[in-house]
Image (cartoon, rainbow, N blue to C red):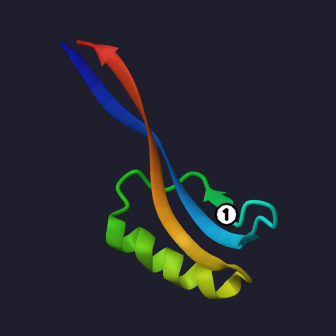
Amino acid sequence: MASAERIDSRLQLTFENGVDPTSGDPIYKSKSFNNVKLDATADQLLAITEAITPLQQLVLYSVKRNDTELITED
């Protein structure tokens, strides 16, 4: 049987960065924050996002948490 252990976490904020003049599709720009505490809750990450967003010039589009897990055999 396999087990998974979370070993890394990252917060990724995606912002709207204009519109493609040819296709009319939105263009996005991402900013990542590494070394997020593994036990940080979604509420805590949202609070940080709300503190960071007013410092940005672009409009926030999405917030993601990317976790990396080490999978080992028991």
Residue 22 in percent (x, y) is at 80, 61
In which quarter of the view is residue 3 placed?
Answer: top left
Q: Residue at x 49, y 65 (%)?
A: 63
Residue 73 is situated, as x and y percent measured from the top left of the image, at 28, 11
Residue in the picture at 52% in, 75% down: 49
Q: Is residue 38 left or right of residue 16?
A: left
The furthest residue to the left: 1
Q: Residue furthest right?
A: 21
Q: Is residue 4 left or right of residue 27?
A: left
Amino acid residing under circle 1: Asp
Front residue (pair 45, 13): 13
Residue 2 horizontal side relative to residue 9, left or right: left
Q: Residue furthest bottom?
A: 54
Look at the numbered disc 1 and give the secondary structure of its residue: loop
Residue at image position (50%, 56%) is: 36
Image coordinates for residue 13, horizontal then vertical, percent: 58, 65
Question: Label 1 belongs to which residue?
Answer: 25
